[in-house]
Amino acid sequence: MKSLAEALSFSSVMCYLLTSSFFFFFPHPSYSALESFIYAGCTQFKYNDGSPFETNLNSVLTSIANSASLSNFNNFKISLPGSTDSDIVYGLFQCRGDLTSSDCHNCITHAVSQLGKICIDTSGGALQLEGCYVKYDNVSFLGAVDKTVVLKKCGSSSGYDSDFLTRRDAVQAYLTGAGQYFRVGGSGKVQGMAQCIQDLSMSQCQDCLSEAIQQLKNECGSSSWGDMFLAKCYARYSVRGVSSDGGKQFRRRGWWFMICGFIFSFIYVMLC
């Protein structure tokens, strides 16, 4: 079977009106900071109700929700008695590095609930919220390096502002060399944040973040803010908070990606 990184579908009610193979993105809603939607994706492959795979998946998601009250990261491989190799479910979660245990648990609980509404009966799914990330799949992705660009967004150009550019470059240099899984830094009006999924080694994390930050430089230039989410890490910077714009669509490695506008944000809020 193909993995989540090979075939994705938009599987909420609205998706069937559009396509069956979308990886979709929403702007950040303002109703809840930590639970703001950043992106999600689902495989196009379905599992059968009542199957051993469904039992294993439920066990993974329950383990994720329970574990989030104890740590900000964990990963799982579950194959209950009676399962075959194709029924194995791999999963992980991670919270942003500055969250309290309570905030982490609340964010993950919400993410697990929403993932079930977005990826209906699919064999793989991923959901990135502002404060946390959850992913599961029937093909192992644990410990695997993946620098696929999942989401990139850039703000409007700030024009030539030497102070801004100097401070932005300083923040990005700090994020590149900080040597932690979660990194934050600032210089004057410019702030930055970066994080790796903790199933990577530190050297793999460093490599992933170096790529993300280089992509930010290449893609966002003099933009006043930028987001670069790779499959296993992200880097962000802003002057006065991160915003979004929509309308861009592209295809890469067999996936469809879309950065959507207000209507999709509205649909997501209605699902919550």
Image: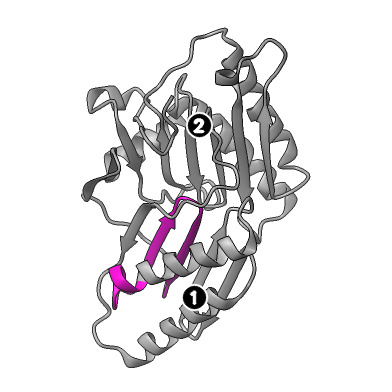
Mark identifier at residue 191: 1
User: Would you say 176 lies left or right of 159 here?
Assistant: right
User: Would you say 56 lies left or right of 15 here?
Assistant: right
Q: Amino acid at mark 1?
A: Gln
Q: Where, quadrant-wise, is the N terminus in this rendering?
A: top left
- Is residue 241 shown to the viewer in this render? no
Residue 221: image location, x then y, percent: 29, 75
Residue 263: image location, x then y, percent: 28, 39
Determine contact: label 1, label 2, CB under 8 Å: no
Residue 243 on the magenta span:
no
Residue 238 on the magenta span:
yes
Dot 2 corresponds to which residue? 115
Crowd tier of the residue under label 2, counting other residues whose Cα lies within 10 Å: few below 14, some 14–19, many 20 or above: many
SS at mark 2 in the image: helix
Q: Residue at x 63, y 36 (%)?
A: 109
Q: Residue at x 41, y 36 (%)?
A: 41
Residue 77: image location, x then y, percent: 66, 31
- Is residue 85 shown to the viewer in this render? yes
